[in-house]
């Protein structure tokens, strides 16, 4: 168990969003699901207007 895991266990508010994704949904954003290699995050898009534009462009249904 590493320091970040211990800190997250002792103080849940200290968890990073990556740790929360791993814990809640078993999503590891640091490892590629296809090849198992390291993943580098280059952006975090949190603007709803931008997200809707991107999803519309991909012909996805926005709920």
Image (spheres, rainbow, N blue to C red):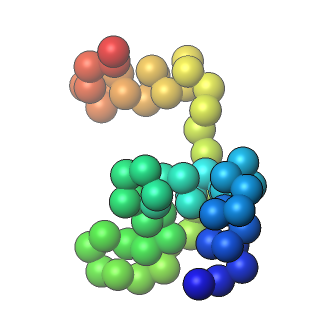
Extreme-front residue of the structure: 10
Residue 20: percent from the left, percent from the top? 54, 53
Residue 2: percent from the left, percent from the top? 65, 83
The answer to whether one can see residue 40 in this image is yes
Quadrant of image for the C terminus: top left
Drawn side of residue 28 relative to residue 63, left or right: right
Drawn side of residue 4 relative to residue 54, left or right: right
Q: Residue at x 72, y 48 (%)?
A: 13
Quarter occupied by residue 3: bottom right
Q: Where 48 falls versus 44 (above or below)? A: above
Drawn side of residue 2 relative to residue 28, left or right: right
The answer to whether one can see residue 43 in this image is no
Q: Where 1 falls versus 25 (above or below)? A: below
Camera-side residue of 17 and 48: 17
Q: Residue at x 62, y 26 (%)?
A: 47
Drawn side of residue 21 relative to residue 41, left or right: left
Residue 17: percent from the left, percent from the top? 61, 51
Q: Residue at x 56, y 69 (%)?
A: 40
Quadrant of image for the N terminus: bottom right
Q: Give the number of callouts.
A: 0
Quarter occupied by residue 45: top right
Camera-side residue of 23 and 10: 10
Q: Residue at x 48, y 79 (%)?
A: 38
């Amino acid at each position: 168990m590493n320091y970040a895991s211990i800190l997250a266990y002792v103080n849940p508010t200290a968890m990073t969003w990556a740790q929360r994704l791993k814990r809640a949904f078993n999503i590891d954003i640091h490892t590629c699901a296809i090849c198992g290699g390291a993943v580098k995050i280059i952006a975090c898009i949190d603007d709803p207007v931008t997200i809707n534009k991107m999803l519309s462009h991909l012909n996805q249904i926005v709920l």
